[in-house]
Amino acid sequence: MHPRVRQNFPVCKKILTFAPKRFSMPDISEKGIKMPASPIRKLVPYADAAKDRGIKVYHLNIGQPDIASPQTALNAIRNFENRVIEYGHSAGNLSYRKKLAKYYNELKIDISYEDILITAGGSEALLIALNVCLNPGDEVIVPEPFYTNYNSFALQAGVKIKPITTKIESGFAMPLMKEFENMITPSTKAILLCNPNNPTGYLYSRKELEQLGEIVAKHDLFLISDEVYREFCYDDFEYFSCMELKGIEDNVILIDSTSKRYSMCGIRVGAIVTRNKKVTESILHFCQSRLCAPIIGQIAAEAALDTPDTYFSNMHKEYLSRRNCLVERLNKIRDVFCPMPKGAFYTIVRLPVDDAEKFAIWLLDNFEYQGQTVMLAPAAGFYHTQGKGINEVRIAYVLQKPDLINAIRCLKYALEKYNR
Amino acid sequence: MHPRVRQNFPVCKKILTFAPKRFSMPDISEKGIKMPASPIRKLVPYADAAKDRGIKVYHLNIGQPDIASPQTALNAIRNFENRVIEYGHSAGNLSYRKKLAKYYNELKIDISYEDILITAGGSEALLIALNVCLNPGDEVIVPEPFYTNYNSFALQAGVKIKPITTKIESGFAMPLMKEFENMITPSTKAILLCNPNNPTGYLYSRKELEQLGEIVAKHDLFLISDEVYREFCYDDFEYFSCMELKGIEDNVILIDSTSKRYSMCGIRVGAIVTRNKKVTESILHFCQSRLCAPIIGQIAAEAALDTPDTYFSNMHKEYLSRRNCLVERLNKIRDVFCPMPKGAFYTIVRLPVDDAEKFAIWLLDNFEYQGQTVMLAPAAGFYHTQGKGINEVRIAYVLQKPDLINAIRCLKYALEKYNR
């Protein structure tokens, strides 16, 4: 690893003068050693260094939308009137859960507020879901490439990820059902799906999900469905929730987050939704152990449920236009291949490079085009199988179109220069 | 368990009509089964039922202070001006970490901002610290009674708690050093301390901590020190941080939270502080997996660092007066014993009852005095050793004095009636 990656935590010289007599220290845990740096964030020190040199960096690496958060949510924060910021209920604020249940009901997800537990983002939701559903050593099947932090949550829960590789040539479509069946062992306890998919932008169809539901029922598995991007579906492709699947109501666990829907990633408010009462009871105990989800965030999230439809139609139009602009321009670059994503705001792109991580570092460290460069997320970190995705990157189209166009132009010149 | 305890999650009849064909479902995990309900919160349904009957319930069960949050923090929330609530840095907002480092430096804790990682409350800080420092199966020694959620965090991390029982007769003083030494096995990896102590109110002296530090050094253990109540020390007892111990700088991990200091439990902002660079690097990876701590909370916490000294001197005076009022009155009740706490805002009280949990439920379910009753936290949940603390409760003195006096009067009459 390049030395600059470690600059965030330089060795503090003071320590040596404090403790002159001993240099031994207890070892950290195996989990602690194995916990990977985020492939989305680990190149940040290179980006910071580029910015220090006065270079404009286009952040295509991270799903941080630039769309304004809903006014109603911002107002709720600004109108916060309590004199004490108290603990809330461990399951989440009751008024928020009740209103959120209506949101789901309108999506044809038939649940009551008692089936909802509010979490500190989708991240906590996933970690708790894995902890509640799987024992250490149990296996969860996940189509890869997948959201990289699934690795971290699985590592924390001691759970084994069994990946099924999906292919860029088919737009990362759902694996064949026999591939799932082949992967199932006595230790398999769950299938984890992200729909619409981060990082691939694939949207699973109703038919694909119904087929998967049959396997879930047959092998009595949990189906953990991360659907935080449901508001981002393009063309005529329709979002179908795993919560709508019949006959496996007790198997399905929905992971949700307000981060992307309302462009307010920083409030850290998500949810776990399931009709399985044993699961909700146990999740509640996990939630009690950390007392409550962030209160101000919950107030903002509750208010955000009043966001007018125009907000979403404008957002949808904007992302659709960015997607089309991005994919068209990328595919015009020689030897670059980008499938057309159907949902979310990411895409995996194959680049004509030996090693996309090396290239991403080079972009920040050695390249500039008219004082600009691009930050990419190397896709290898989104694959579980060693060696996959080496020449792929994930791109988030969360920039305004003029910036997006500049970023792709940079990338084009960079590829030419890099391959010379 | 009384049936009403389960009322939070009644079986939803809809499920049966949705899934008529199958009633099997995958089992939840062992952790999921074992995760305990919070002894502080599990009686909430009884309290709700009492309130529904029109009874005023004095909450002595939970450390939810009634003191107003600092005006400067509330203003920061109300003045939030960003148009997008974006992700923050995984380690915490840089400006907050830098300002927080100064706060610690003024407390004679010599660290830099790079030694600080901001977490979602002290809860997340503890969970991550255990995960980073201990392998599943490793042992952590904790004097009991201890903050009940340590059990939950240990269970999540797969870590074994080895308790050393401290005694109410000695005010729950630090165990003898030989008791720690006797408890150490090849699997012992850490000692976990809460200072000032929740639930006992004990404050560890510099001398006691230095002795403990020698054991930590000798056996090369981590010393995880939860010091979230440092602003609450009474009489002439002085707070001494484990971070000040010499020679074990790489062993000490400080757990902190803004919840109690600024009476803003709901913002969910805490911190892990350590000079051990291997630990901070790994913690950062854990933090990256959940992206960032709540942003609005961090803004409030940063602003709270400007809270004027008068806020703390007033708060201190108020709690001191409550403590004196509570302890004096409790000890006047026949066969009740309450040691004098030196810090925090809790005390463990021995009651003349067969089973404090039964009594606590009875208080909510069958008792009232002039339309009022009291909610207590049964202390057994704060002990790891089965059978300990059966006739003890934890009381948080977080009510205004007139309410506190009423609550103790209720308790007095309740004990007379219960024992008749």
Image (cartoon, coloured by chain):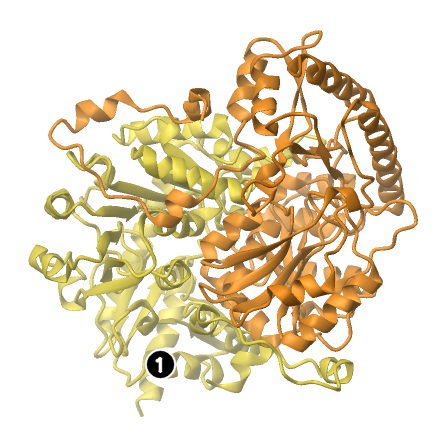
Chain colours: A orange, B yellow
Asked which secondary structure carries label 1, the reply is helix
Tell me the quarter of the picture where residue B367 sits. Answer: bottom left
Q: Is B276 in front, or is B80?
A: B276
Compared with residue B81, is residue A138 higher up or lower down, i.e. above or below? below
The reply, left or right, for residue B329 in relation to residue B172 is right
Is residue A84 something that shows in the picture? no
Query: What amino acid type is highlighted by mark number 1?
Result: Tyr
Is residue B102 something that shows in the picture? yes
Q: Check the residue under mark 1 and report the chain it is in.
A: B
The reply, left or right, for residue A362 in relation to residue A68 is left
Q: Is B412 in front, or is B171?
A: B171
- At 76% from the left edge and 21% from the top edge, which residue is drawn? A408
Q: Residues within 10 Å of mark 1 (few under 14, many from 20)?
A: some
Residue underneath mark 1: B413
Residue placed farthest to the top in the image?
Answer: A370
Tell me the quarter of the picture where residue B111 sits. Answer: top left
Q: Position of residue A353 (x, y in %)?
A: 65, 25
Q: Position of residue B15 (x, y in %)?
A: 72, 80
Q: Position of residue A61 (x, y in %)?
A: 65, 31
Q: Position of residue A18 (x, y in %)?
A: 18, 26
Residue placed farthest to the left in the image?
Answer: B178
- At 42% from the left edge and 72% from the top edge, which residue is drawn? B34
Tell me the quarter of the picture where residue A60 sits. Answer: top right
- At 60% from the left edge and 24% from the top edge, which residue is drawn? A360
